[in-house]
Amino acid sequence: MSLRAKLGNQSALIFACTLGFVLLGAYLLFEHYTRELYYKKLQGRATTAAFFYLEKDELTGSKYREIEEKYRQISGEPIRLYHAGSGELFVDDKLDYVLPARVLNNIARQGHHNFRIRGRHFAGIFYKDNQGDFIVVASGNNTAGSEQLAALRWMLAIFFVLGIGINYGMTRWLARRTFSPFSRLIRKVNAINTDNLHTRLRIPAGKPNELTALITNFNYLLERLEAGVKSQRNFLKNASHELKTPLAAIIGEIEVTLKQPREHEDYEQQLQLLKKEALHLQSIMEGLLMLSGLEMARDADMQPVRIDEILWNVLEKTGMQYPQAVIFADFDGMAEHEKLLVVKGNRELLFVALSNLLDNAVKFSLPHPIHVTVAAQSGRLSITIRDEGPGIAEAEQGRIFDLFYRSSQTRHINGHGIGLHLTAQILERHRAERYIHSKPGEGTAIQVIFPAA
């Protein structure tokens, strides 16, 4: 059963219970009011009968004639009088109803008492007179009230059925109207596949509600799926593209080596070439795997880390990798800004990013020295890595962070164009800004500015 049908059925059930409770309560209140009104009418008749039978000697002529006139109006209705002390009938109504002594005692004790016997209504009053104490009882069947209650029952039943029907129809209409945006949303979602993951659902105008929250979260899910699929596709495309060259070189070297027998030294030389190509292949694979993992892991472990500790580890690693490199590190400007050295980030990713920047500077600057400057700039941490290499033309500065891009001036230097792109992705993840200051023949300075804490 659809949610729309469930909403209609459950709403109709709740409305039926509520309406039934209200109508039943109204009927019971009206029944009680009708009964009490009839009892008051019977008590009035009993009082009139008491005046007629017991007060003739005490009332003036005109007053008694008035009482007599009222009594004639009810003279055809049953009235009985009892002596309160003996319970003896003084006036009998000839009805086949025997009132128990406890009922008469209740009337005498309470002053009045209303009760029913076999569906007939009785109202009794206790009346004191100079001739003695009497109990006057008037009775009757509330025919008019019963007819009114019967008519009311039919009307309430009809309106109950009509109300449920109208409510069910209106609820189904309202459910269709309410769920129509969800139906349209489902159709749009069903139209999305791996070829159009860039599609985003339109957020309806107006105040935010559950539908807009659902669409927003779904768009965020699409964004993450698109990033994951794009990462996988880029990995396959880039891997197939970049692995062709070293694999072709390895296969070529093997084929050349196998064509004829060679000396031991020749085999060693060929194996060294194969090792070089295999290491290059391994470096490409590691870079692609790290880049793919970085693009898919949108919620990296971010916590407060000290940049100076990471940078010293990078300097140590680079010094071991390039013993001939000369690197100057300047932390003097941070003596009064030590708090800026703590940033929110991922230690391993920041190590990779700074290591790539320094590695690039060393490769393009040897045998010239490298200058690493850590300083405070407008309340933010700034790291500048400056080399004395060939520099970068202005037209190429915007492309050096592209995947697999190699400048025409640096193709003779080992590399595969993954490191700087990976660095750009890591810095973007940490919301760090990067700037390039370079002129051909004057070296290059890459500045990284971390956001304020």
Image (cartoon, rainbow, N blue to C red):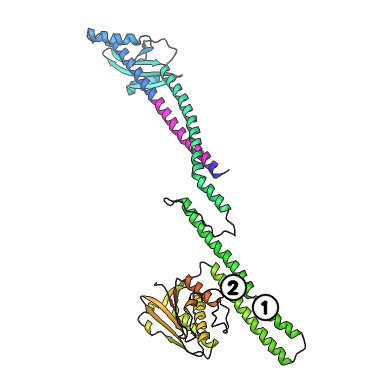
In the visual, does 443 lie left or right of 187?
A: left
Look at the image and tell me whether residue 271 can be seen.
yes
Which residue shows up at 29% across the image and 9% down it?
69
- On the image, numbered disc 1 is attached to which residue? 247
Label 2 crowding class (10 Å Cα cut-off): few <14, some 14-19, many 20+? some
Marks 2 and 1: which is nearer the front?
A: 1
In the rendered image, residue 448, in percent from the top left (x then y), is placed at 44, 77
Q: Is residue 397 above or below residue 111?
A: below
| Magenta-drawn stretch contains 405 | no
> 111 or 307: nearer the eye?
307
Q: What's the magenta region?
A: 5-32
Q: Which mark is residue 267?
A: none
Q: Is residue 113 above or below residue 433?
A: above
Which residue shows up at 55% across the image and 78% down it?
406
In the rendered image, residue 131, in percent from the top left (x then y), is placed at 28, 12
In the visual, does 318 lie left or right of 85?
A: right
Quadrant hosting residue 378: bottom left
Numbered disc 1: secondary structure = helix
In the rendered image, residue 19, in percent from the top left (x then y), is placed at 45, 34
Quadrant hosting residue 63: top left
- On the image, numbered disc 2 is attached to which residue? 289
N-terminal of the two: label 2 or label 1? 1
Which residue shows up at 58% across the image and 53% down it?
191
> 347 or 230: nearer the eye?
230
Q: Quadrant of the C terminus?
A: bottom left
